[in-house]
Amino acid sequence: MPTRGGAPHPGVEVTGAPLGSLLLQVVRRHAALAHELLARIGVTPPQELVLLYLEDHGPVQQSELVRFLGRDRSTVSVTLGAMERAGLITRSPSETHRRAMLVRLTGTGRDLCPRIRQAWAELEDRAFGGLTTERRAELAAGLATVRDALDRK
């Protein structure tokens, strides 16, 4: 098991898949820290992504958020329902598409966006702050290659 300063790193380790095992450990820790940082603000993943997307793109159809998040429609609907109850977004029927719902930021949701961006900046710094600019670029290129390979059918 890999160590850091003599202490073992807990996590899944599959014999014969050292990179996949390490990637899973990193993803889990990254997600846990993101959840912790976002909880301080009062949102949970992927609520912060919805808020940032709406801040960047303005009101959008709910189906666009389903596409953006890459999750099924019912899961996104549950997320949006919780956000609506919390006063972060509103949903209303689209005036141009009879069956579509339009999702908009509320003032409360918009006010959280700078804090969400700060949380993501802290997460980025804590995760990658120990890497040089060159190593970050290499890691980004490597991860993009892996992502693209996994997308191929």
Image (tube, rainbow, N blue to C red):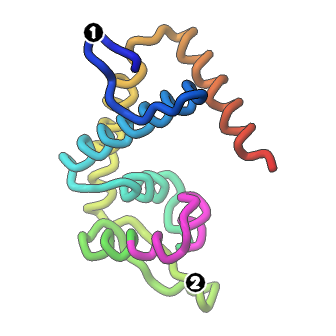
Q: Which residues are magenta?
A: 63-78
**90 is within the stretch colored magenta:** no
- In the displayed structure, would residue 63 be above or below residue 18? below
In what element is the residue under mark 1?
A: loop
Q: How many numbered dots are placed on residues in this image?
A: 2
**77 is within the stretch colored magenta:** yes
Image quarter (top left, top right, bottom left or bottom right) of the N terminus: top left
Percent position of residue 91, x then y: 42, 79
> Quadrant of the rendered structure where residue 55 is?
bottom left
- Identify which residue is drawn at 62% across, 16% down: 138
- Identify which residue is drawn at 48% across, 8% down: 132
In what element is the residue under mark 2?
A: loop
- In the picture, measured across the screen, residue 85 lies left or right of residue 63, that is left
Farthest left residue in view: 40
Farthest right residue in view: 153
Amino acid type indicated by mark 1: Gly
Percent position of residue 65, x then y: 54, 65
Majority secondary structure in the magenta region? helix
Labelled disc at residue 6: 1
**What's the CA distance linking mark 1 and mark 2?**
56 Å
Labelled disc at residue 100: 2
- Identify which residue is drawn at 45% across, 12% down: 131
Q: Nearer the viewer, residue 69 or 116?
A: 69
Q: Is there a contact, CB below 8 Å, between mark 1 and mark 2?
A: no
Q: Nearer the viewer, residue 12 or 129?
A: 12
Amino acid type indicated by mark 2: Ala
- In the picture, measured across the screen, residue 23 lies left or right of residue 84, that is right
